[in-house]
Image: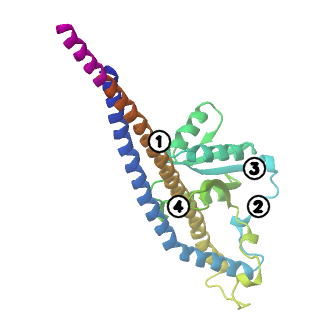
Amino acid sequence: MSNMREIRERIKSINDIMKITNAMYLISSSKLKKAKKDLAATEPYFDKLLYAMRSILSRAPEDIDMRFFDTRTEIPADKRKKAFIIITADKGMCGSYNHNVIKRAEAEMEQCEYARLFVMGQVGRMYFQRKAREGELDVDAEFIQTTQNPTLYRAMKIAVLMMELFEQKKVDDVYIVYTKMLNSMTFEPKVQQLLPLNVNNFVTSEEDVTRHHEATFYPTVEAVMEHLTPNFMKGLIYGAMVESFCSEQQARMSAMDSATTSAKDMLQTLSLQYNRARQAAITQEITEISSGAEAAK
């Protein structure tokens, strides 16, 4: 009876956990659909923004202010101050999602002498702050951003901060480490450079610009670029945030689906054990009754 009671308790416990994992799967599925819809709704705007940047840079005079395109070649590679925006999840239970992006970020930081970290997500923040207390890293403690429900406003705040640090020469390069969703089942950590911007990434061929070879910029080329560059940076960061959020939800869906499947397998095994124990108990009771009846005779 004691063995049967233990099996019943385990079955009840696994059933309760399976309800949680199944609910988390459904929640992540809903969030994933919403994030994909939001990304699809904003893509046309950023496509046009990229097109405008290409058109302007293909015709802009060579002497315009291009401080966000300044590669600072006079600074040696091993002396450059690099900033990393690292996007992790706010919680676990999403397989190897957090581990992979943290591992990729650490691999990038090993290649530079000075790295300043701006971590999004509670999991990554706790991990890197623990390392910072050990004196290994420089983590911005005031940079507290969640990765849930990415917004353009949050992306703009980050873009403005990075541009200010770059202008003040507190950092020479800015990178964002995030997880890119390749398809519905595959995603991988990726590193993208945000600053300085590379002109070659905008103008690649004559087909990328309009047919008009002359253009007038009002009030000035610098003023137009001052307006477009922050918005372009915002688009890059927002895209990385949404990609990471989608990857996180997909990873959590896969992890919860695997957990639910494992729970069903465990329930099947435990049910078999319970039935065997119950059958053994019934057989023992029948044997005892029969033995008692024989003794009474």
Magenta-tinted stretch? 282-297
Q: What residue is rendered at 32% in x and 28% in y?
A: 279
Quadrant of res 201: bottom right
Judge left or right: residue 273 versus residue 253. left
Q: Tag 3: Cα neighbours inside 10 Å, few (<14), some, or many (≥20)?
A: some
- What mark, if any, has residue 262 been given in the picture? 1
Asked if residue 78 can be seen in this view, the reply is yes
Mark 4 burial class by Cα count in 10 Å: few <14, some 14-19, many 20+: many
Q: Is residue 223 visible?
A: no
Q: Amino acid at mark 3?
A: Arg
Mark 4 / mark 3, whichever is N-terminal: 3
Considering depth in this image, is 66 or 99 the residue closer to the camera? 99
Mark 2 surroundings within 10 Å by alpha-carbon count, few (fewer than 14), some (14 through 19), many (20 or more) = some
Q: Which residue is mark 3?
A: 80
Residue in front for this viewpoint, 22 or 269: 269
Please tell me whether the stretch drawn in magenta is mainly helix, strand or loop.
helix
